Image (tube, rainbow, N blue to C red):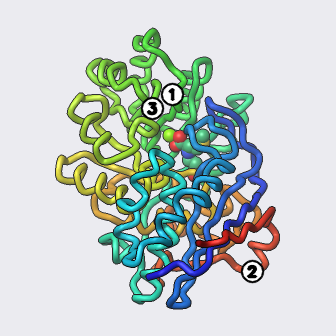
Amino acid sequence: MKIEQVALHEVALPLVSPFRTSVGVQEHRVALLVELRTDDGVTGWGECVAEEDPSYASEYLSGAREVIRRFLLPVLTADPRLSAARAAELMKPVRGHRMAKAAVEMALLDAELRRAGISLAEHLGAVRESVPVGVSVGIMDSLDELITAVDGYLGAGYARIKLKIEPGWDLEPVAAVRETFGSAVALQVDANTAYSPVDLAHLRKLDAFGLTLIEQPFAPDDLETHARLAARIDTPVCLDESITSARDAVTALRQGACSIVNVKPGRVGGYLEARRIHDLCQAAGVPVWCGGMLETGLGRAANLALAALPGFTLPGDISASARYFHRDITDPFVLEGGRLRVPSGPGIGIAPDAAGLAAALVTTDLVPLG
Ligand code: SMG
Ligand code: MG
């Protein structure tokens, strides 16, 4: 396969409601899409999950665009034997920038699999046609507001609730949700690194609420404190920001820093590395689930393919399009009994619809290829 043309599109989609986490508030999802045409005349789509600001991760959208244009595409277009499977190795001389790499790899996978008539789900080893999904609920101004939001999501059928927490918004919101909706609701929390080692005793109080897991309470590079918490708390500790590769996952598990892994393809450099994490966790009996980055329908489609693998035993942050956007850039994903259907068409199984893309489009950059 040879890359003939690449367009980088920036799109902005207003969120149906602001999404607040311990690292900031988002009112729009601004995303970078990779549209890549190959010499076979096939078009592949990739989505870069980097956000506008380097607050969740060190990557950010305009930096990712620059890295893709200046460094990643040149090494890929120069290779006569380019394939999606070799892309990560070819891009290795560029250090880091995993979200940028993942977007390019996704577009290559989409193009290659479209041409072969194989779905990404089948290619990755999916075993399910639909998957149960959860919803991530932001930090709110009041407990009343939170209860109303959770009530709406449970009414819509979501299979589990994740509450964003931070110091000052943790025990009370969790207690309020448990008291209002009962112990049968699958409930978990995500701190996005908001706590420090002095909070160990405080976090142990979460054990009273029967949570599925606590996600990333401490800094990404602080495996030690995660391991100390894991040794002192009954609630399973899950890592998100700390895991940027399969090797990181092995290290974290060996150190006892987590017993569950949140797999985000963008964070780990692509769907193929994400599958490696799935494989090693499955072999070790460690549950994994698919994280979310407020993706458009493109990233959502690919995440559903990944979440259909057998080791994804917990519902992911892969909600219906309507949870995020008034209008997605693809056909919307709709909840059916707490589940989303895994796309079965070739490649990622979906593409932007022209009107949806036009409505969200901010800029298009045609990348000159050497
Ligand atoms: O896509 O439903 C979604 C969002 C899920 O909470 C979500 N993502 O840390 O897991 C996470 C966050 C990262 C993005 S907001 C900083
Ligand atoms: Mg997280």
Q: CA distance from mark 1 to mark 3?
A: 6 Å
Residue at position x 64%, y 65% from top? 33
Residue to which mark 3 is pinned: 216
From the top left corner, tell me how far across and down residue 327 is, in percent.
Answer: 75, 67
Q: Pick whichever, 40 or 32, lies toward us.
A: 40
Is the residue under label 2 in contact with that under label 3 (CB below 8 Å)?
no
Is the residue under label 3 in contact with that under label 1 (CB below 8 Å)?
yes
Is ligand 2 less than 8 Å from the beta carbon at label 3? yes
Q: CA distance from mark 3 to mark 2?
A: 38 Å
Quadrant assignment for the N terminus: bottom left
From the top left corner, tell me how far across and down residue 189 is, in percent.
Answer: 49, 34
Q: Secondary structure at mark 3?
A: loop
Residue to which mark 2 is pinned: 354
Residue at position x 61%, y 72% from top? 369
| 88 lies left or right of 162 | left
Q: Is residue 341 visible?
A: no
Instruction: Look at discs 3 and 2 and give the one toward the viewer.
Output: 2
With respect to residue 350, does 52 lie above or below?
above
Please, what is the three-letter code of the amino acid marked with disc 1? Answer: Thr
| 76 lies left or right of 327 | left
Q: Secondary structure at mark 1?
A: loop
From the top left corner, tell me how far across and down residue 346 is, in percent.
Answer: 46, 84
From the top left corner, tell me how far across and down residue 265 is, in percent.
Answer: 45, 55
Residue at position x 46%, y 45% from top? 96
Q: Which mark is residue 193?
A: 1
Quadrant assignment for the C terminus: bottom right
Q: Quadrant of residue 13?
A: bottom right
Please, what is the three-letter code of the amino acid marked with disc 3? Answer: Gln
Residue farthest toward the front in the current orientation of the protein = 370
Q: CA distance from mark 1 to mark 2?
A: 39 Å
Query: Between disc 1 and disc 3, whose residue precedes?
Result: 1
